Image: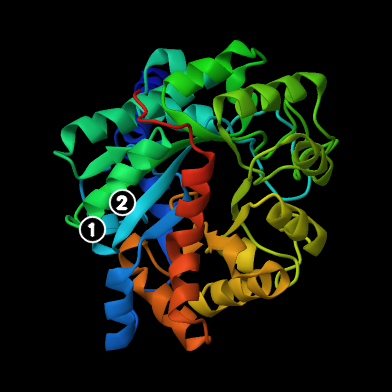
Amino acid sequence: MLMKRILIGSAALFSMGLFYFFTWGARHIDQLLNLVARPPHCEASRDAKELHQRLLIADLHCDLLLWQRDPLAMARYGHVDVPRLIKGNVTLQVFSVVTKVPWGMNYERNSGVSDITAPLVVAQRWPMGTWFGLRERALYQARRFHSAVARSQGKLVFIGSAGDLKNHIERRRRDPDAVAGILSVEGLHALEGELANVNVLYRAGFRMMAPSHFFDNEVGGSAHGLRKGGLTMFGRRVIARMEELNIIVDLAHASPRMTDDILAMVTRPVVVSHTGVRGTCESLRNLNDQQIVRIARSGGVVGIGFWQGAVCGNDVTSIVRAISYVADLVGVDHVALGSDFDGATRTPLDAAGLVCMTEALSVAGFTESDVYKIMGGNTLRLLMEALPDGVGRK
């Protein structure tokens, strides 16, 4: 009888654990990992507030689509949703999709054998095809984005081409309560080793792709992988196909060897969507001076991240210090915002608090023209040059 009670009690505890995991677990993980270090407020001057409202603001990286929040509803936690983007006067947000992250993720050495994303996918009740399929995880997140666009009554707009972006910017001058979104892939292990999947992801709306994330894959080496190699033969075919389709290459997380190989191949500007620089924060995660110079020579843009590992600080001053370093090294035309909002990061502000960046840049001595470029002008210029022509459709 005692053993029976023990077994029944154990089964009940196991069932309660599963209920918590599938009902509240993923939400609590989201709340614990995506934090604002300080309230998203600052003592912005009237001049900074007025300047902020005149800007066309763009951010190169957020991971909102990994979390089962409604992009159209303002959440009490995390960093990004459409209401907060509108409040922050954001013109365009790049929405990146994560498909696999190794257990024990670190900046030094990671194997691609394990997958911490899988239990999160299951806990959030994603379709069964996403439980083991990396391409399906990317496509599911794209469908979530397009569903939000369809439900938004014009508040969220899909950008698939230079024509789409031009139309959106013209509309923003009349209606500031609209945000554009571009889809990006963080790590081309989502291709599952098939070149044809570049086209599949393109048709789903992806216009930016980062070849690697936290581990080496079929395309090439990660800055955090075991071998940290260059482009593979398959990777060269992938980059060539991306060039044909006018898909923007994102060098975030790429190994130095793969960065060199890609810069030797591409004929168009590249981005580093979210990073820091070793000149202000020494880390394997961050770019050295030579890499920054070569990216700038491509016409590219470096997006400065907002989290501790990128800028060695949990304050806006640390972010501005990294921005200033890039501007001094290669010019103000090649630096931008790359927050990594909702990327399991702790940041000093959320999307609604971006006026703090405008204030801090102004205080640091950047001119109004400089602030315009850094806060979004450089990103929008690159996108207008690099996106496919015409008007895109999903």
- On screen, residue 152 versus residue 220, left or right, reads left
The kind of residue on which mark 2 rests is: Ile
**SS assignment at label 2:** helix
Q: Nearer the viewer, residue 272 or 140?
A: 272
Q: Residue furthest front?
A: 390
Q: Is there any visible trace of residue 266 in the rendered image?
A: yes
User: Quick check: 332 above or below 264?
Assistant: below
Q: Nearer the viewer, residue 72 or 1?
A: 72
The kind of residue on which mark 1 rests is: Arg
Residue beneath the point at 37% across and 68% down? 354
**Numbered disc total:** 2
**SS assignment at label 1:** loop
Q: CA distance from mark 2 to mark 1?
A: 7 Å
User: Quick check: 46 above or below 81?
Assistant: below
Q: Position of residue 127 (x, y in %)?
A: 37, 17
Disc 2 + disc 1, Cβ < 8 Å: yes
| Residue matched to label 2 | 169
| Residue matched to label 1 | 173
Residue beneath the point at 61% across and 33% down? 187
Quadrant of the snapshot with the C terminus? top left
